[in-house]
């Protein structure tokens, strides 16, 4: 006679998503919600989070306004999340930015700093805030959003590509540093994400060749899962 199967007592995953009000952020949040996760949504403006996810600001989930490029702001956000959630299993850093630029010889410092702050330094700020929580538990997963073009320079995209290349090197370095502590660090590297902003910016392009946010979110969920436990410092390229 077989014993009845008892209901699962596995607690829900505790997931942090930066840039949660953006197109990829919303898809990522929805993916983890579908998996039953408890989520802390980080965005620069809390009202944008409320508008993107009406009714989600309850005792189960958190909406947190914070500046991802500020280490002080991120540490304050992490402290609030840790107080409520007690621990964090996964951090998904979708926040970032893109802008075309002039040629390298005409590049201005302000453009360079904007791209480096939002795409590279923001990852450092996120790491400073959340890595200690994962190291203390001896487990966790950090997932960044880099770019497929990070491997080589292209005209009029120097600051953006340099910042995404810097992000990939940071991911690799942090992966090597945290692997002994049981924490995995990886990224997805899409070609072009199919978002309203990209469609507006590139009206003559063919969006069918781009990467849907749902597919990108699915890949992020894979990197957060036990199936990806052997991956460290990898950038999963998405799109042709």
Image (cartoon, helix red, strand yellow):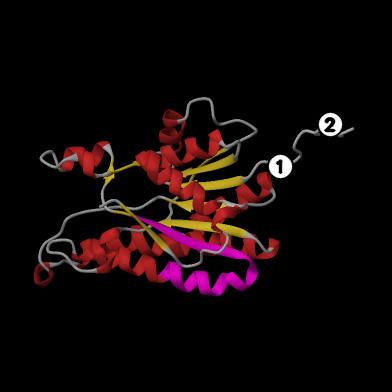
Q: Are marks 1 and 2 in contact (CB under 8 Å)?
A: no
- Residue 71 appearing in the image: no
Q: Is residue 74 above or below residue 172?
A: above
The residue that disc 2 covers is 4
Q: Residue furthest right?
A: 1
Around disc 2, counting alpha carbons within 10 Å, would you say few (fewer than 14), some (14 to 19), or many (20 or more)?
few
Task: Count up the numbered dots.
Answer: 2
What residue is shown at x 21% (from left), y 54% (from top)? 99
Q: Is residue 208 above or below residue 112?
A: above
* Magenta stretch prevailing secondary structure: helix
Res 11 label: 1
For the record, the magenta segment spans 170-189
What residue is shown at x 12% (from left), y 64% (from top)? 155
Residue 222 horizontal/vertical position (percent): 50, 50
SS for callout 2? loop
Residue 236 horizontal/vertical position (percent): 39, 58
What residue is shown at x 25% (from left), y 64% (from top)? 161
Q: Nearer the viewer, residue 63 or 240?
A: 240
Seen in the image, is 138 located left or right of residue 128?
right
Nearer to us of marks 1 and 2 is: 2
Between the residue at mark 1 and the residue at mark 2, the CA separation in whole angstroms equals 21 Å
Q: Is residue 212 above or below residue 186?
A: above
Res 234 label: none
């Amino acid at each position: 006679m077989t014993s009845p199967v008892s209901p699962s007592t596995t607690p829900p995953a505790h997931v942090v998503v930066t840039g949660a009000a953006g197109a990829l952020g919303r898809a990522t949040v929805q993916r983890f919600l579908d998996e039953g996760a408890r989520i802390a949504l980080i965005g620069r403006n809390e009202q944008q989070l409320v508008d993107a996810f009406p009714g989600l600001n309850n005792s189960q989930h958190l909406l947190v306004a914070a500046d991802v490029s500020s280490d002080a702001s991120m540490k304050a956000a992490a402290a609030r999340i840790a107080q409520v959630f007690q621990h964090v299993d996964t951090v998904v850093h979708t926040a970032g930015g893109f802008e075309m630029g002039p040629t390298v010889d005409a590049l201005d410092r302000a453009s360079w700093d904007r791209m480096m702050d939002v795409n590279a330094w923001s990852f450092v700020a996120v790491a400073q805030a959340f890595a200690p929580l994962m190291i203390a538990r001896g487990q966790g997963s950090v997932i960044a959003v880099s770019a497929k073009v990070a491997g080589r320079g292209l005209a009029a995209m120097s600051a953006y590509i340099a910042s995404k290349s810097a992000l990939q090197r940071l991911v690799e370095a942090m992966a090597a540093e945290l692997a002994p502590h049981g924490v995995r660090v990886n990224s997805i590297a899409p070609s072009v994400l199919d978002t309203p902003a990209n469609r507006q910016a590139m009206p003559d392009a063919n969006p069918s060749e781009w990467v849907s946010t749902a597919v990108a979110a699915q890949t992020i969920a894979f990197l957060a899962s036990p199936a990806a436990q052997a991956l460290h410092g990898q950038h999963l390229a998405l799109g042709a």
